[in-house]
Image (tube, rainbow, N blue to C red):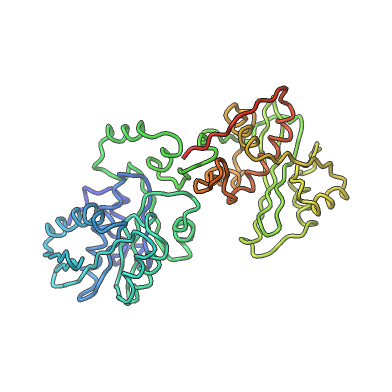
Amino acid sequence: MSYQAFSPKQRTVLTWWTSGSPYEGKEAIVCDGAVRSGKTLAMGLSFFLWAMVCFDGKRFGVCGKTISSLRRNVLSEILPRMEALGAVWKEKRTENLVTVTFKGHRNQFYIFGGRDESSASLIQGITFAGVLLDEVALMPRSFVEQACARCSVAGSRLWFNCNPAGPSHWFYKNWIQEAESRNCLRLHFTMEDNPSLTEQIRQRYHRLYTGVFYRRFVLGQWAQAEGRVYDFFGPDMVKPVPEGSFEKWYISCDYGTVNPTSMGLWGLLNGVWYRVKEFYFSSRTQMRQMTDEEYAGALAELAGGRSITAVIIDPSAASFIEVLRRKEWRIRKADNDVLSGIRLTSDCLKEGRIVICEGCNDCLREMDEYVWDLQSAAKDRVKKENDHAMDDMRYFVSTVLGRQQSSFAACAVERKK
């Protein structure tokens, strides 16, 4: 078969399992990225070729969100191409079973829909030599893990593809970020990896989406889309630390013991406040807790000898405040009105009065993950997740910039669904 029609990344997907490939020792593959990037076709064809070349008389799983979408998006595209290569296939729709014969090998492919948590029971008890999970980010974790557990045949491999979801998605955290430790090949696709798209069509997609949806669907980034608090914020608003002598410095702090502690160093230059550095520590991630003395040391290191006007901190952090006072830091207790703080922070970000600088990675990560609680009965409530850098930023804005406002206006925060 000639691969001239495929892009280099598609050819990698088609050949990663073959003898002599630099990736033949991998036990799994993940293809994620933009819509219309050619990953589904390459992966589906590679999966069937691998199964038919490497195994005979075995069972395989082919999984999608629903059986109908799987037939439409995968099987209707792949099986005719396998037939063109000389394969013979037969489907028993009542049993959701496809039998394929190719080059003297005969294998069975069982079709499953992973619609909800109850779907996991459908796949129990069967043994697979491999499983393909199409649009895996749309399936419940219990179903995916049950499908993976079915692959106990020697030489079995796992095949995943999907478009991005939010950065807190379990698959992103457990498979994409941990690909190396799981002996998994991860390939990120963009529209440029699909040679069947014309430049005109690519440009249409570039015009079609904006903001976070552009990042997710066109750039293929795992960016939060549903209910983001700061949904206007994008990569173009992140700046390098500017040159020049800063006029004033503050540190804002959201203190936690079990929850993460986040601190931001803010500097004033030419009327703009820049978050130039940060400290972020999660006891759950690090598997240990820091003492108040250790946090005070981290704060001093963040200050780096600069003259800090004040440390702005949540009033509830009584023990840490006392340690800082003994060390002669000037303390300012934060204004902790959440909704008005979010409104003011939004205004300051949009107007360029505050800027998050490159290197403040945890703050930038939380900007994507900080969302409204759309299931809450309350009209406006944010989820108490991924909010620690968001809280320390809000403390700074409300306490420092909020006091600079000369007038007061009652307003409502718009929550976008």
Between residue 349 and residue 275, name the one nearer to us: 349
Between residue 214 and residue 142, name the one nearer to us: 142
In-image side of 269 versus 56 (left or right)? right
In-image side of 10 versus 358 (left or right)? left
In-image side of 173 versus 193 (left or right)? right
Residue drawn at the location 62% of the way across and 37% of the way down? 342
Q: Position of residue 229 (x, y in %)?
A: 54, 40
Q: Position of residue 404 (x, y in %)?
A: 73, 26
Q: Position of residue 244 (x, y in %)?
A: 70, 29
The answer to which quarter of the image holds residue 133 is: bottom left
In the picture shown, does residue 6 fall above or below 344? below
In the picture shown, does residue 345 fall above or below 50? above
Q: How many labels, in total?
A: 0
Residue drawn at the location 14% of the way across and 56% of the way down? 80
Indicate the quadrant containing the N terminus: top left, top right, bottom left or bottom right.
Answer: bottom left
Q: Position of residue 183 (x, y in %)?
A: 43, 66
Residue drawn at the location 73% of the way across and 60% of the way down? 290
Residue drawn at the location 39% of the way across and 50% of the way down? 188
For the view shown, which residue lies furthest in the front direction? Answer: 377
The answer to which quarter of the image holds residue 48 is: bottom left
For the view shown, which residue lies furthest in the top direction? Answer: 406
Between residue 86 and residue 384, name the one nearer to us: 384
